[in-house]
Image: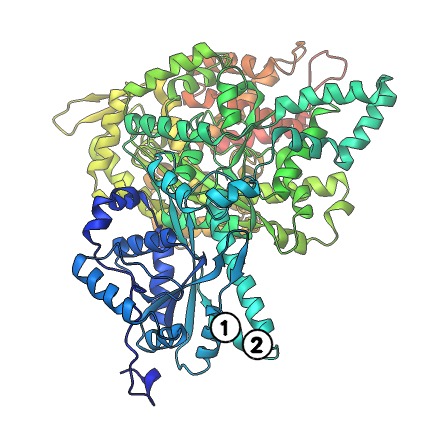
Amino acid sequence: MSKETKGTNISIGEKAGAAMQRHFGFLYTIMGMGLLLRRLRMDDRSTDNIRKAAQKGHLVYVLYARSRMDWLALNRTLNGRKLPLATFTPGLRSFWNRPLKDMIVQGWLAFKQIFSKNRDIEYMREAICKNEAVSIFLVHPRTLGTTASTALQSLMQLQSSLSRPIQLVPISVVWNRRPEVLRSEAIRVVLGSADEPGAFQKLYYVINRDHKPIIQAGEPVHLRDFLTRMSKDRPERQERALRLLLRRYLYRESHVIRGPRIRSHSWTKKLVMDSPSVKALIKEQMQEKRKSEEQIRASMDKILNSIMARFSFRMIVFMGALCRFIWSRIYSGIDVREEDLERIRQAVRMGTPILIPSHRSHLDYLLLSSICYDRGLVMPHIVAGENLSFWPLGTIFRKSGAFFIRRSFQGEAVFPVLFQAYLRLLVRDEFPIEFFIEGGRSRNGKLLPPKVGVLGMVVEASQSVRLNKDVSILPISISYEQIAEEKAYAKELSGKKKEKESVQGVLKSTRVLFKRLGKVYIRVGEPISMNQVHQKLEKPWKEHDERERREQLMRISERIIHRIGKSMLILPTGITALVLLGVGRKGIRILEVQEQATRLNELLERLGAVRADSLSHGGWVVIEALNRFLGEKCIQKIDDENGDIIKIEDDARVTLEYYKNSLIHFVAFVSIASSAFLCTTDRKQAEDFFLLQHYILRYEFFYDPDTAVDTLFNEACSALIQYGALNEDLSIASEDRAKELAGLTQNFLESYLLVLNATSSFRGREIEPKDLPNKIQDFGKARLAIGEVMRPEALSLINIKHAIRAFREDSVVQFRMDGSGLHFHDEALEHYRASLKDLIYLI
């Protein structure tokens, strides 16, 4: 007998029918309960919570309302996970689910106990003293309403006599994933409330394939610590506080799965239209347009309808099935870790999660939502571009939680106010929001400069959340082994106009179902708490002027982009493309590819990158990536007696650049440092070259805004020494290895030099700003033909646009106000041009 039971040698035995069963009987089987409950799920985190609680103290499962179905579902799930079963449950007996012999024995024992006094407290005490698990219910349901159980009070009294703490584990049994709806009293009598459905509705949920009941175990409550914290309060107050805490935990776990209540479309519109900002706008529009309030409201109503989501769980179920079919056809798997899902769950528990994924493909919209649906998480509302609102895709997306934004608010007075008011309502109601901070899809595989419009609205809305709630920004990386749109992206970067989204385009996209695109990896980076952001501000957000807000938003957005990049994985296609394009030559031996891939992989891991599981299988994965590129006709394989050679097709370098850029942000600062040391052996001059590249390439690579540039340079020097490119005194140790790294960013330097050379040749011409990138690209194609531009990927339209933006900001190149052409700061232009020529080495 354990230490807890010293002082008593009398055992009162067990209460008949009050223990869970490791094995069920024939009635359980012939009634089909085994088949019905087989779809119950419990995640790994819940399992860990229960195991840790059992190790730390006496395990007590806490369910909300007394229900045999919930209790049986928990029993079934604990069996499946091989977790401790409750040997006693006060106020509940069950016989029919037991094996026949046990049913008879327990039935006879129950008959003998009919006239005995209620000894539930003693039974519970004995079970706990034997270190056996117990389950309790917080309330007992009645026809109308509930009454509190006395189990908590008994546990509090019992804790004072125990040497080990009681661990209260909140267990939420979610039978229906649909968001909560209100019910009449008559319906509640038959089916139960939305929060606590009755037995009939629970049976319907487990029979209906639209529903996958989920059992969630929350963080355990350490009863001894709780009582110590409230030692000065009366027992009645302690019990009320503990009951409230457990109810909050139970609601929170249910909230993770079902999310907040969804209001009707008309009621949501009313709340938006009645918000202070919209009311003020209505008055302004009435004065400006000389129209009545009804007319203004009618026009706003149309705009609001074009924005708002029309969430439908039936559509979610349909899209979930469709996505599973698509993913099984085109992907070898979707890799997402339990710890990444837990970060999302924790953000939901804390308040409003803001999911900000990288944007590589149209499939990004579906991937994250399908993961949330399949893994039992509340579905996000997604900010989608207005270009996707066409029929029928717009209707499908809208019912799946998408709400639509225009590409630009320029000249718009009404749309941004309505959009912001709707977004603020979603944030306050704790709906998960998903948006892409890069704006559009990245055509070159690199993280794009952040757009801070929606982020600014989120930051402002985060001030209006409920007390003790937070808005958590979750940077998310989506890494593809192969992208579905790679050919379309290559054409766009080569100057072809982007095709407008349409029904015809959707039908064409079905061709992807006949391709295999490898695996997809989803990782959730370190969250950013908006409460902490506001606490660090010197003054409240509302008191910041426009310039100060812009600076703060850029700082937050850079941190988000950096954390997205940091969570990206080393994939075989990415590291192979790094090698193929880094050498600069048109061909490279396969053995050399493998050797460089090994060196680069080691460097990336030292810099904090994490490799995908596939790279753990050895050098053959590089061969597999080469075979994938061969299949896409990006490269040719040439047999040679001294070792097979890979020839890189000029037309395919832009496609390979996409995969190279998925990793370039990890090594960019090392690469530009290597280019600097190839120019000069003097440390000070090398640092100046490093600073120059760091500055002019500011729209290409995003670093941690909290890391100083000189610190970054020192880290780059250390990395080059470890790579074998530099000696300890920073002299060149191996020119070949230095060029391996410098070659990774040479195409960007060529793009920027191309822009300076092209714009110089356009002096005196009348050129519209929108036409300039294409004219520079045409200029570059001619220089590529005669060898003045060495790398075809330097002609990327995205690189050219970023270079124009950077040089215009520095006043190196400007458009004349009278439209007569370009204006130059000749001294700055020549300085940049000379420096870039020094940094670009000949292949």
Q: Residue at x 84, y 17 (%)?
A: 291
Q: CA distance from mark 2 to mark 1?
A: 8 Å
Instruction: Identify the residue at the far bottom of this view.
Output: 7
What label sits on residue 495 in the rendered view? none
Is the residue 830 above or below the residue 357 in the image? above
Q: Measuring 41% from the left and 44% from the top, which residue is drawn there? A: 175
Q: Residue furthest left?
A: 641
Residue 698: horizontal and vertical position, in percent? 56, 36
Q: Is 100 placed above or below 376 here?
A: below
- What residue type is disc 1 on? Gln
Q: Is residue 610 above or below residue 22?
A: above
Q: Amino acid at mark 2?
A: Pro
How many numbered marks, from 0 up?
A: 2
* Mark 2 vs 1: CB contact within 8 A: yes
Query: Residue 483, percent across and down?
Result: 37, 26
Q: Name the residue carrying label 2.
A: 235
Q: Is residue 750 above or below residue 344?
A: above
Evaluate whether residue 682 shows in this view.
no
Q: As rendered, which of 56 and 455 lies closer to the eye? A: 56
First of labels 2, 1 by sequence position: 1
Residue neighbourhood size for the residue with mark 2, other residues' Cα within 10 Å, grouped as few (<14), some (14–19), many (≥20)? some
The residue identified by callout 1 is 153
| In-front residue for pair 306/131 | 131
Q: How many residues crowd around disc 1 within 10 Å: few (fewer than 14), some, or many (20 or more)?
A: some
Residue 361 % position (x, y): 43, 26
Residue for point 39% across, 78% down: 164
In this rendered view, identify the residue nearer to me: 830 or 244: 244
SS type, badge 1: helix
Colour scheme: rainbow
217 sits to left or right of 799: left
